Image (spheres, rainbow, N blue to C red):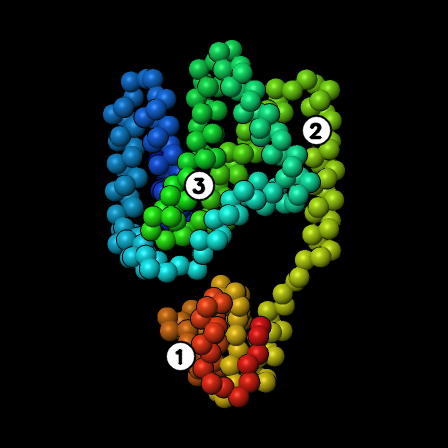
Amino acid sequence: SILYAVYSILLMYTHYFGIFVIITQNIHYLLFNSNKKGKKWIFLQAIILLSYLPWIFKFISRILAIYNEFWIKKSYLLFVFLYPFIYAGGIILGLIYFSLLIYSIRYYLRNAKKINSNEHSQIELLLLLIFVPIIIAITYSFVVTPILSHQYVVYSSLGIFVMIAWGIYKLKTSYKAIFMVTLVVISLIYVGIQNQNQIKFKWEDSVEYSKSVLNQDDIAVIFPGYHILSFLFYFDDCFHSIDVDTCLYKKNLTIIYSDYEQLKNLPNKNSVIFI
């Protein structure tokens, strides 16, 4: 119980979307809990809430900051149907995993009466973990501002893969072996292809090049903007600086790290280099 509270607190501090997992767990408790440990559950939730209070104002300010505009567009919501393929790593594996997921859910529905109560509860939690966070994010995206992207609800893939593993476990022994070998072989092929085709960013070389060719009349653009952290890693003082822009400017570097919309309004400089 205490470990659950500790893990939940760490989850909340790791990413804002961790709250969706806590909401999912509470929905599961309210809908499917049949024991008499209500006070203990409420106590644990209170511990989680109190532990998050030091960060609550930052959480609220972040919500307000993205209220009018966020980097995610509404058109991105259509990609929700591709999430199984994204999490699987490709089309072929995605089709296999998606088929196994449908089989697992179908097996559960058809054999619900034969499954013991503990297994029932576990499967119900897995199904909620798969769908509830995504439904919450989609609803918020339509009502307020788009926030749904596959990396933000990646923990739903945990429910998907565990559900698939449960479905494979329920197969006949001969089918289990066939599916396991097939998944391992295809996965290794995908890993090999990705390793061959992956673009390996040499940020140290990029930084040294920027230092040698850029001056204050030039501008360097880092896109996507989150790569600025990789770039700054080789500027020890700027990496730890509160005012990154000023720190870079003192080094004769004007760096823009932002999204596509803001790149439309670049300041006037002699030359622009994309990194």
Whether residue 166 is visible to the viewer of this picture, yes or no, is: no
- The amino acid beneath tag 1 is Thr
Contact? badges 3 and 2 (CB < 8 Å):
no
Q: Residues within 10 Å of mark 3 (few under 14, many from 20)?
A: many
- The relative height of residue 75 versus residue 32 in the rendered view (above or below) is below
Residue 179 disc label? 2
Which residue is depicted at the point 61% across and 19% down?
170
Viewer-proximal residue, 126 or 243? Answer: 126
Indicate the quadrant where residue 243 lies. Answer: bottom left
Q: In the rendered view, would you say 267 is above or below 257?
A: below
Q: Position of residue 61 (x, y in %)?
A: 28, 57
Residue at horizontal 29 percent and vertical 18 percent from the top: 36
Find disc 1 in the rendering and name its residue: 246
Q: Determine which residue is flagged by label 3.
A: 134
Q: Choose between 69 and 2: the one closer to the eye.
A: 69
Q: Residue furthest top?
A: 114
